Image: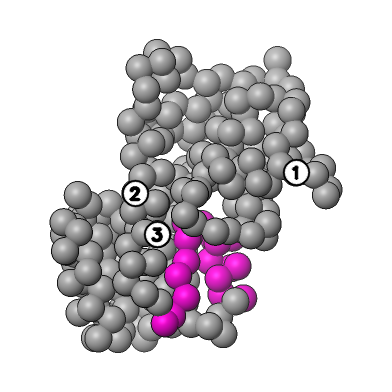
Amino acid sequence: MATIALVDDDENILTSVSIALEAEGHTVKTFEDGAAALDYINATPPDMIVSDIKMPTMDGMELLRRIRQSSSLPLIFLTSKDEEIDEVLGLTMGADDYVKKPFSQRLLLERVKAVLRRRQASETPTEEEEKKIMRRGELTLDPMRHACTWKGKPVVLTVTEFLILESLAQRPGFVKSRDALMDAAYDDQVYVDDRTIDSHIKRVRKKFRQVDKEFDSIETLYGVGYKYKDAS
């Protein structure tokens, strides 16, 4: 089971969600704002973070921004009904998923389970995957270590970003629809729309261009999907 950092300024949510997660066998560390959570995360990284967006001292967006400077820890946002812009921005910044308030405990538990399953799948490859690191020109993907490099330089990806890129790179030159990328990166029980995949692709491109300004290996085919360009 996982250690989960739960961050929310609502004491009722901290209590109820903690009980639900602990009933599933997880260890939960609770925090009322992002600043306190960040100190803990930097000192003792958990397996996952579940965080509200609007909080005092340090909100969820700033917490995510600081975490993504050095870590790909999975993060699920808790958002209010009127925070659609924040949801899209959060995904663009590298959040793995979001759940709208008010939410059922069962829905949140399913989302947590799905993200943890995706992370485990990327870190615990099959025997065949262990034997073969994927190389596509300047790109190297190591599923066993959840490691990605471009021209020998590390590119830190979230679980979702890694699985999307891996799906594209498996067949260079072939177009992958958004639905196909959703299937590769998300559990069947988790619904995401086209904007979510687009946001992840934008985030992946941005990370690679921080390493190489000329990076253009992910091509958009408008109305169809994406493809990874043929690599020698």
- Badge 3 crowding class, 10 Å Cα cut-off, few under 14, some 14 to 19, many 20 or more, is many
Residue at 64% x, 41% y is 180
Residues in magenta, as a range: 85-102
Depth check: 211 or 131 in front? Answer: 131
Tell me if 225 is positioned left or right of 72 in this view.
Answer: right
Residue at 20% x, 59% y is 24
Q: Which tag, 3 or 1, sits closer to the chain's start?
A: 3
Q: What is the number of the mark on residue 123?
A: none
Residue at 75% x, 43% y is 225
Q: What is the number of the mark on residue 111?
A: 3
The residue pinned by badge 1 equals: 225
Residue 30 in picture, x, y percent from top left: 21, 72
| Disc 1, SS | strand
- Answer yes or no: do the residues labelled 3 and 2 have beta carbons within 8 Å? no
- Badge 2 crowding class, 10 Å Cα cut-off, few under 14, some 14 to 19, many 20 or more, is some
> Image quadrant for the C terminus?
top right
Residue 12 in picture, x, y percent from top left: 25, 86
Residue 112, above or below 187: below
Q: Which tag, 1 or 2, sits closer to the chain's start?
A: 2
Q: How is the image coloured?
A: one colour
Depth check: 228 or 137 in front? Answer: 228
The residue pinned by badge 2 equals: 116
Q: Which tag, 3 or 2, sits closer to the chain's start?
A: 3
